[in-house]
Amino acid sequence: MTSRFWQRYTQAYAGLPGEAWILAGINLINAAGTMVVFFMTLYMTQTFGFTPARAGRIIAAFGVGMLAGTVLGGKLADKIGTRAVQKASLIASGGVLIILGYERNLPLLVVLVFLCGIGNGALFPANVSAMAEICGPSDRSRGFALNRLASNLGATIGPVAGGFLARWDYRFLFWGDGLTSLLAALALFIFLPGVALKKNSPKLEPILRAEGGNAKAALWRLLPCTFGSALIFSQLYGALPLYLHSAYRLSENLIGLAIALNPVMIVLVQMSVTYGVERFPKARVAAAGTAFLAAGFGLLPLGFGFAFALLSTAVWTIGEMLLLPTQLTMISTLAPEGAQGTYQGFNSLAFGLGVVFGPMLGTQVLEKAGAEALWFGLAGVGLIVSIAYLRSNNQ
């Protein structure tokens, strides 16, 4: 049993290019310091005395910045190269994060949160495009999964360390996040010098057979699904920490530990899950992933305490593992040669819109209408998105 599991586990990693492992290692470094985003709403409410709704509106500035950053990063990745965009965004984000921990002026605070969003937004399409350039079409889902696995391996450190640092002094949280971004940029300069990775982008491979391979039409049918799933997933950065703190009576370090189950699961089984579902139609995998994601959050009003928080995390993590690599693969398969960054930029833009509206709407609904309206409502959104994926006719 153990040997069969290990054989399947190693098969999932076999054949990926060396550059994919280097890129994943750099992502691990950056993700190991991902702390601030998980505790920003608590930081705003406890340090500045903001209401949850007001904190959610400030966090929305991060999402707005991501919107601008994703479009900019995707376009620049196609023009000046994926490496250059990643280096610039990591350096900018690192500096802004350190400054953010010391700022007490509200307008400047919003500006810094916005700039932090730009840096994060620009990084993602460039990073995804880099992996798409490295991996051929048959390896692309596993390449994206490896990238996410590395990010989540690093994230097993970030929320836990961030929870303890926040209880000590929130400024150390900002320093830790900023310095790891700068360290990741340094690793890019050392291990992936130059401006471009080797080109391995396929010719247009239409996945919307019913529409004659019209890539743009297929793209615009998928983007609302990306937006809907982001509305659900972004509660991780907005309403979820507040709800676990107030309704479940969890301290910051226990919230961090509950969230840390997500990257632990991804590290252990993400690649095996991605490898195991490769033979299934992408639309069905994405629909199933969205259903699990929504169910995980929809469970929250039905229980209480640390153990139930872990159960909720486990369910929505299964959804994340099924959905996100599949979603990226569907978009990358659509992209014509030379437009990988632009297509991923549009996909990131749709996800960023969800990040803008998700925390803002989630905290508003939580405060005004209550937990059941929020979490059951998100479960309904997930059902709609799942049906939309099934109707998209993707292969």
Image (cartoon, helix red, strand yellow):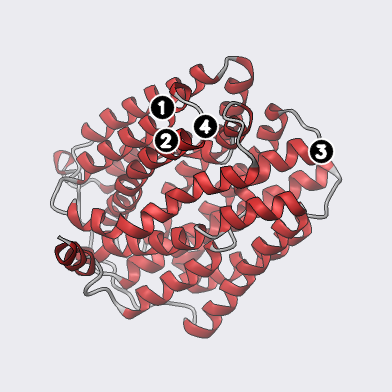
Mark 1 Cα within 10 Å, few/some/many (few <14, many 20+)?
A: many
Q: Residue furthest top?
A: 369
Task: Tell me how far mark 3 sits from mark 4, CA to CA.
Answer: 27 Å
* Residue placed under numbered mark 4 in the picture: 305
SS state under label 4: loop
> Residue 355, how many percent across, how many down?
53, 40
* Residue placed under numbered mark 1 in the picture: 299
Of circles 3 and 4, the one toward us is 4
Q: Confirm or deny contact between disc 1 and disc 2 (CB under 8 A).
A: yes
Q: Amino acid at mark 3?
A: Phe
> Residue 218, how many percent across, how many down?
27, 42
Q: Quadrant of residue 2?
A: bottom left
Label at residue 383:
none
Mark 4 Cα within 10 Å, few/some/many (few <14, many 20+)?
A: few
Q: Amino acid at mark 1?
A: Leu
Q: Nearer the viewer, residue 210 or 225?
A: 225
Q: Confirm or deny contact between disc 1 and disc 4 (CB under 8 A).
A: no
Q: Confirm or deny contact between disc 2 and disc 4 (CB under 8 A).
A: no
SS state under label 2: helix
Q: Earlier in the sequence, mark 1 or mark 4?
A: 1
Q: Amino acid at mark 4?
A: Gly
Task: Tell me how far mark 3 sits from mark 2, CA to CA.
Answer: 30 Å
* Residue placed under numbered mark 2 in the picture: 312
Label at residue 48:
3
Q: Amino acid at mark 2?
A: Ser
Task: Tell me how far mark 2 sits from mark 4, CA to CA.
Answer: 11 Å
The residue positioned 40% from the left and 68% from the top of the image is 130
> Residue 187, how many percent across, how many down?
54, 79
Q: Nearer the viewer, residue 330 or 290?
A: 290
Task: Tell me how far mark 1 sits from mark 2, CA to CA.
Answer: 6 Å
Q: Earlier in the sequence, mark 1 or mark 2?
A: 1
Q: Quadrant of residue 95?
A: bottom right
